[in-house]
Amino acid sequence: KSANPQWREQFDFHYFSDRKDMLDIEVWRKDNKKHEELLGTCHVDITALPTKQTNCLELPLEKHPGSLLMLIAVAPCTGVSISDLCVCPLGDPNERQQISQRYCIKNSFRDIKDIGFLQVKVLKAVDLMAADFSGILFLDPFCVLELGNDMLQTHTVYKNLNPEWNKVFTFPIKDIHDVLEVTVFDEDGDKPPDFLGKVAIPLLSV
């Protein structure tokens, strides 16, 4: 019971630079498990924030008294990337040349953190079904890709059983024995997403 709560929690999101998304924040009050009251909302335009620095923001709650103090940092993911299928990084001759030079034989004796890279094109899913066979007519699916300690995800395609993502994911390979895991989830609002299915692909099989 506090009018000046302190959470001191950190949340990490993978942000798609090709999408002009807003960060939406809601503040709620819970009296018990059954009663909830919205105390206010605020929005942050991520594209307007300077990158590679921590931004201290005091955000007034819309249509309600009070404000929210946050620290937001926008930083590029080291070694991983996400792009649209139509602008695939390997389609750029300069990009191909840089990658070829990095992994050429003469650099094999240098102390580099990765031994290569993996590029994954996530096109679409077909005939998705709720994992509990509940007969749900529509899903809000998205994909999560994991390789080693790196994790990226697609955007959510709402109300669709045959979603198309058309995204290209690039991962650095640090261990040839790693396994690429692709998991499909159903977004469920403020609840944990529902598991829809998963595939595991050993790099040695690629």
Image: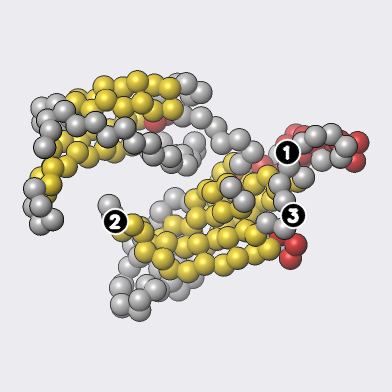
* SS type, badge 2: strand
Read off the residue under disc 2. Answer: 191
Please determine whether, in this image, residue 13 is positioned above or below residue 35.
above
Q: How far apart are labels 3 and 2 at the CA level?
A: 35 Å
Return the x and y of residue 166 as percentages of the image width and height: 54, 54
Return the x and y of residue 62 as percentages of the image width and height: 16, 31
Q: Residues within 10 Å of mark 3 (few under 14, many from 20)?
A: few
Q: How far apart are labels 1 and 3 at the CA level?
A: 13 Å
Return the x and y of residue 136 as percentages of the image width and height: 30, 73
Read off the residue under disc 3. Answer: 176
* SS type, badge 3: loop
Which of the 4 image quadrants contains residue 1? top left
Residue at left offset 46%, top offset 29%: 74
Quadrant of the image containing the C terminus: bottom right
Q: How far apart are labels 1 and 2 at the CA level?
A: 37 Å
**Mark sitting earlier along the chain (3/2):** 3
Disc marking residue 93: none
Horizontally, residue 133 falls left or right of residue 121, namely left
**Mark sitting earlier along the chain (1/3):** 1
Identify residue type, mark 2.
Answer: Lys
* SS type, badge 1: loop
Residue 100, visible in the rendered structure? no
Residue 58, visible in the rendered structure? yes
Which of the 4 image quadrants contains residue 95? top right
Identify residue type, mark 3.
Answer: Ile
Residue extending farthest to the front is 1
Looking at the image, which is closer to me, 140 or 92?
A: 140
Count all numbered tags in the image, as a single digit.
Answer: 3
Horizontally, residue 78 falls left or right of residue 173, namely left
Identify residue type, mark 1.
Answer: Lys
Read off the residue under disc 1. Answer: 113
**Mark sitting earlier along the chain (1/2):** 1
